[in-house]
Amino acid sequence: MKIIPHSMHSRRTSKPEYGPYILRALNNKGKASKDEVLDETLRLMKPRLYPADLEELPGGAPRWRRQAENMLDGLLEDGYVAESRGRLTLTRRGLNYLSGS
C-alpha cells in the first residue's frame, strides 16, 4: 500500500482562481515587474489561501507562487497582460475583464 502525504488530500487553490487576483494586483501596481505583481497577488489572496498552497515544492518555491506564475503565463499568452522590457501591464482585454465588459 502506498501512503500519500496528507497535503495531497488537502484542498488547494486551483490555477484559474489566481487569474482575477493577478489582474487586480497588476491594476493596483500599474506597470510592474513579475515579482511585484506576484507579491501583490499574495497580499490580495493570502486570507483565502489554503495551508497546502503555502507548502514549499521541490525547488523551494511555495505552491501558490508556482500556480500564480503558471496562470500569469496564461494571461500573457491570452492577451490579458503584456510584457515589455521586464515590465508587465494590463492590456485592453485585461482592463475590460476587470470592468466587467
Image (cartoon, rainbow, N blue to C red):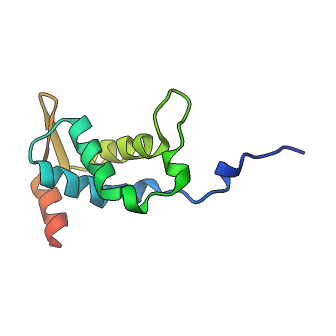
Q: Measuring 21% from the left and 39% from the top, which residue is drawn there?
A: 36
Quarter of the image where the C terminus is located? bottom left
- Please give the name of the residue rendered at 28% of the width and 43% of the height, measured from the top-left corner: 39
93 vs 67, left or right, is: left
Side of 98 where 58 appears, left or right = right
* Quarter-of-image position of residue 31: top left
Residue at 54% x, 53% y is 51
User: In the rendered image of this protein, does residue 48 appear above or below residue 78?
Assistant: below
Judged from this view, the residue extending furthest toward the bottom is: 100
In-image side of 10 versus 44 (left or right) = right
Quadrant assignment, res 27: bottom left
Depth check: give the residue in front, 32 or 76.
Answer: 32
Q: Position of residue 63 (x, y in %)?
A: 49, 43
Question: Residue shown at 56%/51% (left/top)?
Answer: 52
**Residue 66: x percent and y percent?**
43, 40
**Residue 81 place in picture, x, y as percent:** 19, 47
**Quadrant in the picture for the N terminus:** top right
